Amino acid sequence: MSGLGFGSRKLPGLANVLRVLAFDMTDAPAAEEVALLAFEVDDQTAEDLALGLERLRACDGVLDVVQSPVYGKKGRMAAQVQVLGAAAAPRDGSRRLFRRNHDPGGAPPGDRA
């Protein structure tokens, strides 16, 4: 269902228009809860990062992996990574990520040896 209406008030530089779209959600699939894990990487080569992200994409429960260039501390280039995954096991996904990290300072809190 949709509707379109024009108001009678005059607004300088603006159109006084309202458009409404209404959707019936009875046939929609059940909502799925997801978790977002975001982090920055500044100490890996592009090749190593690409390989790691490809492995991450292949993990169960991972829905999407996005990489974006960002500036880190002191103007250094880094990569921001966002992982969208099933909300049921975000802790397992972060452990999997940091298991391959060569920097012990990068381990999640409580997981350091």
Image (cartoon, rainbow, N blue to C red):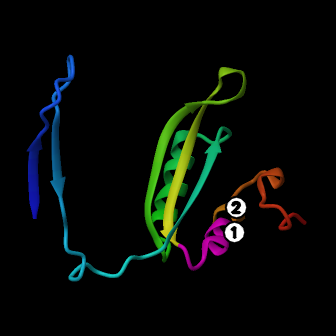
Q: Report the label total.
A: 2
Find disc 1 in the rendering and name its residue: 95
Circle 2/circle 1 CB separation < 8 Å: yes
Q: Residue at x 45, y 64 (%)?
A: 57
Residue that sits furthest to the right in the current view? 113
Where residue 58 sits in the image (x, y, percent)? 45, 69
Q: Is residue 92 part of the magenta span, yes or no?
A: yes
Q: Magenta stretch: dominant SS? A: helix
Gap between marks 2 and 1 measured at Cα = 5 Å
Which residue is at the far front? 8
Element at label 2: helix
- Magenta residues, as a range? 87-96
Q: Which picture quadrant has residue 22? A: bottom left
Q: Residue at x 59, y 52 (%)?
A: 38
Residue corresponding to mark 2: 98
Which label was assigned to residue 82? none
Check disc 2: other Cα within 10 Å, few if <14, some if 14-19, many if 20+: some
Q: Nearer the viewer, residue 87 or 45?
A: 87
Residue type, numbered disc 1 = Arg
Q: Alpha-carbon neighbours of circle 1 within 10 Å: few (<14), some, or many (≥20)? A: some
Query: At x 72% / y 21%, what residue is drawn?
Result: 74
> Does the stretch in magenta take in 91?
yes
Q: Residue at x 65, y 21 (%)?
A: 75
**Residue 50 coordinates in the image, percent (x, y):** 49, 49
Vertical comparison of 23 with 26: above or below: above
Q: Quadrant of the N terminus?
A: bottom left
Front residue of this view, candidates 33 and 75: 33
Image quarter of residue 77 = top right
Expressed as whole percent of the image width and height from the top left, the position of residue 26 reads 23, 82
Quadrant housing residue 2:
bottom left
Q: Amino acid at mark 2?
A: Phe
